[in-house]
Amino acid sequence: MQMYRKYKMFFTMIFQALLRQKTRMFIALLAVAVGAAIISGMITVYREVPAQLGREFRAYGANVLVLPAGDSSTFDETSLTSVRNALSGEDVVGLAPFLYERLEVNKQPVITGGTDFAELKKVSPYWMVKGEYPAEGSKEILLGAEVAKKIAQDADKAIGQTVSVSAGEGTAIKQFTVSGVVSTGGKEEQFAFVDLHMLQEITGKAGAVGLAQLSIVADGDKLAAVEEKIGAADPAVQPQEVRQIARSEFSVLSKLQVLILLVTLIVLVLTLICVTTTMTAVVTERRKEIGLKKALGASNHNIVMEFLGEGCVLGALGGLLGSGLGYLFAQSVSMNVFSRGISFAPGIAILAIVLSILVTGIASLIPVRIATNVDPAIVLRGE
Amino acid sequence: MSLLELKDVSMLYNGKVPALQHVNLSVEKGDWLAIMGPSGSGKTTLMNIIGCMDHATSGHVILDGVDISEVSNDGLTQLRRDKIGIVFQQFHLIPYLTAVENIMAAQYYHSMPDKKEALEALDRVGLADRADHLPSQLSGGEQQRVCIARALINYPVLILADEPTGNLDEKNQQLVMKIFHELHEEGHTILTVTHSAEVGAEAERRVIIEHGHMREAES
């Protein structure tokens, strides 16, 4: 009960002091709140960037290849089901199987890929297709831009034409309709693409898959764990990281995160300077009050605790206000840059409040030192 | 043994400017002493030394059996807290605390805040109904009475009053002096510093300080 009375008086003095010096304290509160807002916003962005940007990076194609294990040149389609099951908890964007065979299209040899176009669209969203992708199980063919030129001179005119497709001399010839022409800027323009099962039928390789392209939101260590899972899922397949994509993704993300950390550090230092300046001004303005308290018998410990208390309350209030503003800031960044909302993270809010309290606590140390040096006799001198 | 004894006390500022020179003074328990003198005579320096806010350059100051000349700064803080109640000319109330909270602050630094006791102290100086007012909502006389209530709250052995009526009108001056008379009658030891002959005349004993030298006033 006695300690309660003592603490109650302590907090009465702290809160009344803060409330009375509204203008000065508002500036300090604003500094802390802005600092906390930027810090919590930055930490939220820092945390969200890999996930958000990782998804953005997936637009640039697969980051893992699933290849046949050992010396085999193909593996069975069922292995992909095992891989899918093994990755059920992961953020898989798409898994597109491919089987490449040399076919004759209008009697010209063309490397033709059989694939699942629904998955292909997810894995390689950058493919520019004039016309349409072939429908599943249909006798439709997607021609690479260069192949289309060879067949119809003008690539656009190839769309809608019927072409004869066979596995070579002496094999059955099937008629396919050109559903579209694809431009990628890469070697795909020299290929043709049909539904996987159609290609398996033409070549008599039922169920065979040459490779699969996996696009998954994962970086660095997480990607290594994904590869491990794939390796363990089925002995018939082995994963291979698409190094240039995965590494450049990792490198961009790392640089971005370092940048965010640096900005956060600079904001912390600026907040520290601003709060120190304000608190020093507060202490200077209140020299007479400090002298009076000392004349009444307040020890240096009392004075230190009161100013640290004021600083910490200021830090807590500023941190609370700032973490709310920081969330709005991060939300706005995420909406404008990634077009995706982010969820409120209580952990980051708590971290921002604790950091604000620490920063104001540290910022109060110099002013508090000045306060303890105030001579109680100034109240009698009438300075 | 005297409650307060100054033996050959001198104070030099910056090691060469004399503020007090060879001052000797003895105050008994229950005395009401007025230290009088013009501005710059050394009154405030003496008040600082007796009020445990400064060390004399030389000599001994013995308060309630403790030689404060040999006490550290922390020790002086403790002595101020335990033995002295100060009434200031400019009242010096903490501006953001109410009247009763100002008194409780003194209790807080001394031992434990006790609102009931603080209210009784306010009642004693006739301000029970102004307990929840901020200093800015009180008149000068009322502020000074809060200051007196605060000085008394921790049962000090010595009440130091620095020009206690210096900023008050005549009516409030009389009110404050009446309280000092009551305190004196109750046996409190009071030391008033003033340049006013009128206020000095209220005390039972007067000393005059001039250019740092002290002498007993002619009665």
Image (cartoon, coloured by chain):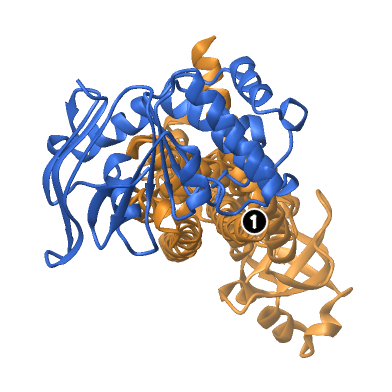
> Considering the image in quadrants, where does the N terminus of chain A appear?
top right
Q: Chain of mark 1?
A: A
Q: In this structure image, what is the colour of chain A?
A: orange
Q: Nearer the viewer, residue A142 or A107?
A: A142
Q: Quick one: which residue is furthest to the right in this view?
A: A160
Q: Residue at left 30%, top 29%?
A: B78
Q: Is residue A226 visible?
A: no
Q: Nearer the viewer, residue A88 or A132?
A: A88
Q: Quick one: which residue is furthest to the bottom in this view?
A: A153
The image shows residue A61 at horizontal and vertical percentages of: 59, 61
Q: Quick one: which residue is furthest to the front in this view?
A: B219
Q: Is residue B19 visible?
A: yes
Label 1: element kind: helix
Q: Nearer the viewer, residue B166 or A248?
A: B166
Which residue has dot 1 on it? A123
- Residue A152: image quadrant is bottom right
Q: Residue at left 34%, top 33%?
A: B80
Q: Amino acid at mark 1?
A: Val
Q: Say whether residue B72 is left or right of residue B142.
A: left
Q: Residue at left 12%, top 36%?
A: B70
The image shows residue A14 at horizontal and vertical percentages of: 56, 39
Q: In this structure image, what is the colour of chain B?
A: blue
Q: Nearer the viewer, residue A123 or A294?
A: A294
Q: Is residue A95 above or below residue B211?
A: above
Q: Residue at left 48%, top 49%?
A: B163
The image shows residue A249 at horizontal and vertical percentages of: 48, 62
Q: Is residue B13 above or below residue B179?
A: below
| Crowd around label 1: few <14 · some 14–19 · many ≥20 (10 Å) | many
The image shows residue B11 at horizontal and vertical percentages of: 18, 55
- Total numbered badges shown on the rendered structure: 1
